[in-house]
Amino acid sequence: MAGIYIHIPFCKHKCNYCNFFSVASVKYRDVFVAALLREMEMRKDYLKDAVVNTIYFGGGTPSLLTVDEINTILAKADELFNLNPDLEITLEANPDDLNLEKVKSLKNETPINRFSIGVQSFFDEDLQYLDRQHTAAQARQAIENVQKAGFENMTIDLIYGIPGLTPEKWHKNLDIFFSYHIPHLSSYSLTVEPKTTLQHQIKNRRRAEVDEALSIRHFEILMEEIKQNGFVHYEISNFAKEGFYSKHNSIYWLGDYYLGLGPSAHSFNGVSRQWNVALLKKYIDSDAVEKMVAEKEMLTTEQLFNEYVMTSLRTSWGCDSEHINNVFGAEYANYFTKSIKPFLNEGKVNRHGNRYVLTNHGKLFADGIAMELMRVG
């Protein structure tokens, strides 16, 4: 199984917490699409003959693309790659882009069949803290427009740990989500990334600091509410009804291959990883794939093992010691089973046959546990 990620770098406005590559302009959109098609031609053999099960438009703000631009990109993908007829095609979108007319056009005139809507919160004061451009009312209207147009497969993003977001308000956010019967939720703790506007605002006391204890309480509430409402907590930050797991993100977590197109996009083919330049002008002006790629690294067995542990431990499928033995060898399998014992004893990990899965308590320490299980040197 393979996937294609397409990075659309344009935004109307750069949110204060965002550290993804984007530009607050659509000035070069036409020439960008031409460069994207050129990159697709140059990298048509990257996935070999692997069946492509997912295409994901991320960003940036992909919902700024027109119907014609989306169709042009997807037609080129159909021409160059081995696409599954049952392809999952996701479009990330901001609520203020999703008026009913646009959503109906996407439904009737493009193959888009899944939406990822950046709601973040149903409270205006939270959206103002995050420097979002949409309102809570627009967020609700966008969801209703997507459902009214006939899209069943949808996810929204909600951010927790926002200063001022009390546990009571977080419960209300989740209640509103459940009331729409949306089959998937991605929910993340607010993280203050280096060199972001939010970091600068907090440093200059223009924004309140993030409270880690509040974030932990929100995550605990989230896990409780999700279970009570029949969702599967299938990855640390992702929750779904059966049959609505994100096929695209599952490719990352299960170690399958993916091709990243557009500035800053990452690619992985099982033996190497590479990522594109994070400069729009340089990307647009590149006439060879070598100029578009910022860096490429061949992965060692140790790196591949560490990546497997880091990604699989975040999922409900967990780490499989038999898989480790078959792919990486007995030395790595023995190292893994020895290293994970303390976390079994502490109740942070459960064992189910060959599989080792985080408990709800363990999910609070996922990154730290993964670091302790990695091989270094």
Image: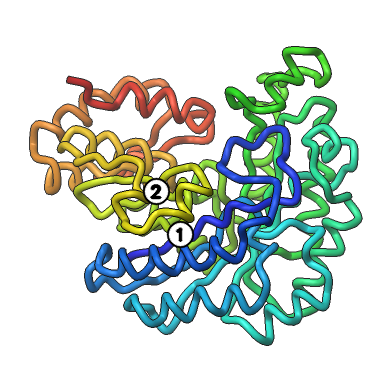
Q: Is residue 356 above or below residue 364?
A: below
Q: Is residue 55 above or below residue 14?
A: below
Where residue 90 sits: x, y (%)?
56, 66
Asked whether residue 229 is in view, the answer is no
Residue type at numbered disc 1: Tyr
- Position of residue 229 measured from the top left corner of the image (x, y, whole percent): 69, 55
- Point 53% across, 35% down: residue: 360
Mark 2–mark 1 Cα distance, whole angstroms, equals: 8 Å
Instruction: Give the x, y percent position of residue 368.
Output: 42, 23
Is 178 located above or below residue 154 in the figure? above
User: Residue at (38%, 82%) from the top-left corner?
Assistant: 79
Q: In the shown orientation, is residue 68 left or right of residue 287? A: right
**Which amino acid type is marked by label 2?**
His
Residue 147's disc is: none
Q: Are marks 2 and 1 in contact (CB under 8 Å)?
A: yes
Which residue is labeled 1 in the image?
5
Q: Tell me if residue 342 comes above or below residue 2 in the rendering.
A: above
Total numbered circles: 2
Query: Dividing the image into 4 quarters, which one contains the C terminus?
Result: top left
Residue plotted at (34% across, 70% down): 41
The one of 99 and 277 positioned closer to us in this rendering: 277
For label 2, the SS is strand
Residue picked out by circle 2? 266
Residue found farthest to the left: 330
Residue 141 is drawn in which quadrant? bottom right
